[in-house]
Image (spheres, rainbow, N blue to C red):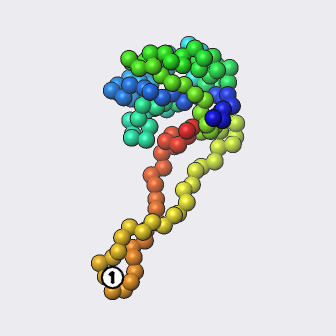
Amino acid sequence: MATIDPNQTLYITNINGRITVEELKSSLYGLFSTYGPILDITAKKTQKMREQAFIVYNNVASATTAKRSLNGFTFFDRPIKIEYAKTKSDTIAKLDGTFRLRTHDANETVLGKRSSEEEGSSAKVARTEESDDDSDDHA
């Protein structure tokens, strides 16, 4: 398995999904802020982000210390798993001037046949996705 280079953003998994987002962010801040200044915490209740969070520190040393100290820590009755994020967070990209707004390909998806099959045309609609700045930031 390829290792991910240390960076300022930590990817936390195996978080208890029964707590509210506000309680989760507050608790994560309380736990992780002891290791250094936190720039951002991303945690959501969407299906894609369920039981996951991202913690962004202002330096790699703080992130590394937190990762070493808290990996496997029991947090709301579950041992959390901590890795470095695979990609640079938007927060860090904005700070270092490399941030670029994400655009999605206009892949056309065939949704089905129109009611007028005699014409031989199928309904094609350009695929659009709701943009959520934090949904794909780090994984």
Q: Name the element at disc 1.
A: helix
The residue that appears at 57% across and 55% down in the rendered structure is 103
- Tell me if 114 is positioned left or right of 30 in this view: left
| Above or below 86: residue 101 | below
Report which quarter residue 63 is drawn in.
Answer: top right
**Is residue 1 visible from the viewing direction of this image?**
yes
Question: In the rendered view of the protein, which quadrant contains the N terminus?
Answer: top right
- Tell me if 63 is positioned left or right of 114 in this view: right
- The one of 98 and 45 positioned closer to us in this rendering: 45
The residue that appears at 62% across and 38% down in the rendered structure is 87
The residue that appears at 48% across and 45% down in the rendered structure is 132
Badge 1: how crowded within 10 Å, few (<14), some, or many (20+)?
few
Q: Position of residue 108 (x, y in %)?
A: 48, 67
- The one of 85 and 34 positioned closer to us in this rendering: 85
Q: Position of residue 67 (x, y in %)?
A: 59, 20
- The one of 119 and 23 positioned closer to us in this rendering: 119
